[in-house]
Amino acid sequence: MAYPYSPSKSGPSICGNRLLAVCDELFLTLCILHAGLLEQDLADRFNMSVSTVSRICLAWINLLYVVLGSINIWPSPESIDKQMPAGIKVIFPNVCVIIDCTEIFTQKPSSLLANSQFYSNYKSHTTLKAMVGIAPHGPFTFISSLFSGAISDIEITKVIC
C-alpha cells in the first residue's frame, strides 16, 4: 500500500519508513473515529507528535473513504423481501428503501454569511444536513454528501434524485 503522506523531515522516522506498523496506524485511526480519543492523547500513547497522529489519521480516513465508498451496500430485492419485518411487509409490501433527511449540529461559524447558510429554522441551530436511506430491516444503505442546514429536505431530494 502506498503511503499517502510524507513523514516529517524533522520528526523521527527510519529512512522515510512508517513509525508504526500498518495495523497500528489503522488502530490509531479507529481509536479517534470510534472512541473519540484526542490526538494529543494518542500522540502520548504512541510516542509521536500530534501532527504525525493527525497526518496518519487523515491518510487513513481518506483511504477508507475511497475503499469503503466504492462498495455496493444495496441489498438485492430478494434479500430485502426475505428480511423485511412482518408489520412493514403487510402495509408496504414493495418498499425497498426508506429515505429521510437528518441534521447534525455544528459549531456556530464566526462569519455571519456562513452562519445564515448553516442555520436551520427547524432545529434553531447551525447544522449540516444529509439524506439517508435505510432498508426496511434496519441497515443504512445510502448516506448523501452533507449540505448546509438552511437547505430544505425537498431541495436535497431534488439534488440527489
Image (spheres, rainbow, N blue to C red):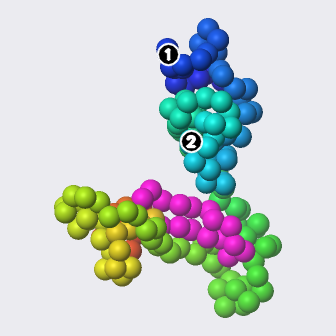
Residue 97 in view (yes/no): yes
> What residue is drawn where x is 65% and y is 59%?
74
* Residue 16: % across, % down: 59, 13
In this picture, residue 75 sits left or right of residue 100: right
The span shown in magenta is 131-146
Q: Residue furthest left?
A: 113
Q: Which mark is residue 86?
A: none
Figure check: 108 above or below 68:
below
Amino acid type at mark 1: Ser
Q: Secondary structure at mark 1?
A: loop
From the viewer's side, name the closer residue of 63 and 73.
Answer: 63
| Location of residue 64 (image quadrant) | top right
* Residue 133: % across, % down: 56, 68
In this picture, residue 161 sits left or right of residue 94: left
> What residue is drawn where x is 29% and y is 60%?
109
Q: Quadrant of the N terminus?
A: top right
| Location of residue 81 (image quadrant) | bottom right
> Is residue 53 one of those drawn in magenta?
no
* Residue 117: % across, % down: 26, 65
Residue 70 in view (yes/no): no
The residue tagged 2 is: 40
The residue tagged 1 is: 10
